[in-house]
Image (tube, rainbow, N blue to C red):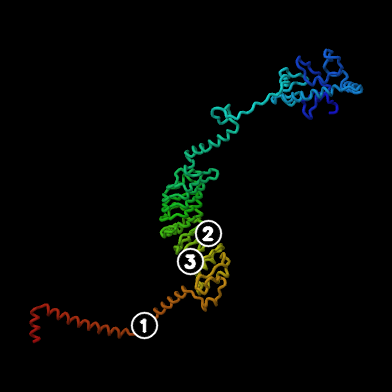
Amino acid sequence: MAAHTIHDFLKYPHCGRGQRPPAAGSAPRRPKPAGIPHPAAALSAPIVETAGKGAPQPRRGRHKHGAAGRGAERGALASRGGRDPLRARRAELKPRTARLHMARPRSAARSRCGKRSGASPRGETPAPEERAARSRPPPRRAARSRRRPKGKVACGAGPGAMPGRGALCLGLLLPVLLGCGSAQPGGCPALCECSEPARTVKCVNRNLTAVPPDLPPYVRSLFITGNPLSDLPAGAFPAQRLPDLASLNLSGNHLRTVEAGSLALPALRQLDLSGNALVSFSPQAFGEGGSPLEELLLRGALRDHGVLLSLAALLQSGALRNLSRLELADNGLLLLPAGMFTALPALRLLDLSNNSLVGLRNVSFQGLGHLQSLNLSDNSLSVLWNSTLAQFRSLPALRHIVLRHNAWVCDCAIEDLVVWLKESDQVEGKEALTCASPDKMLGKALLKINGSDLNCSVPIDLPSQLQTSYVFLGIVLALIGAIFLLVLYLNRKGIKKWMHNIRDACRDHMEGYHYRYEINADPRLTNVSSNSDV
């Protein structure tokens, strides 16, 4: 960098920082064509004092002695007290050079420094057109018109297109394209919302009176809620069209009838029928071959006792052996059908809360080896008998039993329940269980009840007492019968003679009646009888 002088950089003002001007030993340049010379070329001419305007000017070119000669001349002028013409010329040409750089168009070719592909070769002089373009002052940019172009603006590339309009037009056309796609086979129903990436279809509060027949086959989760549906006929959800439907939510509708075959879906895992006033529920609703259903939610859907019996028949048939979650809450149930849950070996969660259950005597939990949670809260249970408590003890996986908000009667019959609560860790929140009656025990925690509070000398178990009484009565009647038979056997001879006498007496009596009948029947014998009487 030190080998080059300021004169070199002034000669090539278009070279950028870090770019080197042509070396001193490079090939000689081609002769410049006739025309206007570059403004910086005058700096390389030797400085000669002139007498006036008409004095001959020196030939422009490099100094014959190079940079050393130019430095010597400037030193001589300075020693004579004159002004350095090189510095004056540089100050004069500096604004003009800046204007030339500003006037140079952006699309022009790069200079000889090699920054642009259209640069002139090294040593060549720019063409006259290029020099004229450089010397021309920069044109003013036309003010952008704020007026919109006449006519309609096209979406996309073209003379009428505007930048940024492509995304806008695409956003306007997207709903139209989606609407056109809904009419195609496998599209979204008109009154539903579909998401193919999530494989979900939602038909919520759309005033539907029937299941849409054009559901897309990709659906896996279907929500049809808040609609006035009244009937679910057979084939409402065709298995061939919906092979992947796994979650079906029909809650909050007005369903009253669920016919046979209406829910025969091969991939159905979750079904929600809560909030429907069901009147008829076919035990063959899931088809003949069973169903892979795992979760069945029937909150507030079993107000009719006939529907409860139909559900019990469905569960006992073994069609839902994979069922792991069953919710029967908010149905006002008083008693459950016997053996309702015996055919559910995979059941893990059973919700019977917010009903009116008064007892669990006829409910069997045997065979529910995987049962983990049992919710019996908000019912009318007054006591749990030993038979029910024994079933709870026999279930190894049962660890969550909810018994809160029940009307516990704290008399002698509850002593077994109190003992089980103190020993077991299966009950959640057992510290909050309190007595509802009698008045002297009202509000007392069950865990704080002692035997002295109940005044029970011997534990009372009414069923066992009745069973003992029946056995004792049978034994007494058997003894009485045996004694009677023994007496008859010992007096058999006297009884036989007594029976013969009775037989003879009956015979004589009957013969007298027969003789009188014959006399009364014959008139001749009647006169004879009268004369004989006289």
Q: Residues within 10 Å of mark 2 (few under 14, many from 20)?
A: many
Q: State the SS at label 1.
A: helix
Residue 469 at what x, y percent from top left? 44, 77
What amino acid type should be assigned to the residue bearing mark 3?
Answer: Ser
Regarding mark 3 in the picture, which secondary structure is present there? loop
| Residue furthest out toward the right | 79
Q: Position of residue 218 (x, y in %)?
A: 51, 44
Name the amino acid type tagged 2. Answer: Leu
Q: Which numbered circle lies on residue 486? A: 1
Comparing 71 with 468, the one in front is: 71
Q: Earlier in the sequence, mark 1 or mark 2?
A: 2
Circle 3 residue: 380
Q: From mark 1 to mark 2, how far is it between C-alphas?
A: 62 Å
Q: In the rendered image of this protein, does residue 433 appear above or below residue 227? A: below
Please rate how many residues cluster around mark 1, counting C-alpha atoms within 10 Å: few if below 14, some from 14 to 19, many from 20: few
The count of marks equals 3
Quick one: SS at disc 2?
Answer: strand
